[in-house]
Image (tube, rainbow, N blue to C red):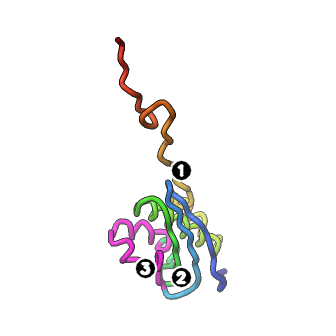
Amino acid sequence: MATATPITVTGRRKTAIAQLRLQPGTGSIHINGREFVDYFPSLSLQNIILRPLELVNGLRSFDLEIKTTGGGIAGQAGAIRLAIARALIENDAEARPLLKKEGFLTRDPRMKERKKPGQPGARKRFQFSKR
């Protein structure tokens, strides 16, 4: 049930946000106007991003145009993976059980804890002086 119209989805992890446009194509991936391999030179991060596409045999079936902001490259890779998984489900609902089983549809909610007033950090306290 593949559609010819582009699918637009969003993925998030920590403070990273990825907006993805998926459409049928030849397998080209562009991130912030750069080639996929240039943006993520690390092979481990490339594998994180491509895993949902490998699961549904869609590596050479879709063109991805991605805009990502915030966080570091690892957080951005996680956000892109979530966006790809969500887009694949919109494209073909039968892929949902496979992606869900691998945990690609779960948003990683862990974020940096905010600094509290009267303290130097989120949990750290100023040194206590008894006298």
Task: Note whether 87 is above or below 107 in the view shown.
Answer: below
Question: Label 2 belongs to which residue?
Answer: 62
Which residue does the image show at 50% across and 65% down from the upper left?
A: 69
Which picture quadrant has residue 72?
Answer: bottom left
Cα distance, mark 2 to mark 3?
A: 17 Å
Task: From the top left corner, tell me how far across and down residue 109 is, in percent.
Answer: 53, 50
Q: Secondary structure at mark 3?
A: strand
User: What is the quadrant of the C terminus in the image?
Assistant: top left
The magenta segment is 27-54
Q: Is residue 81 left or right of residue 87?
A: left
Which residue does the image show at 49% across and 48% down from the upper left?
A: 111
Res 109 label: 1
Classify mark 3: residues with Cα within 10 Å, few (<14), some (14-19) or many (20+).
Answer: few
Name which residue type carries label 3.
Answer: Arg
Question: Label 3 belongs to which residue?
Answer: 34
> Closer to the camera: disc 2 or disc 3?
3
Tell me which numbered mark, 3 or 1, is placed earlier along the sequence: 3
Cα distance, mark 1 to mark 2?
A: 28 Å
Task: Note whether 56 is above or below 77 in the view shown.
Answer: below
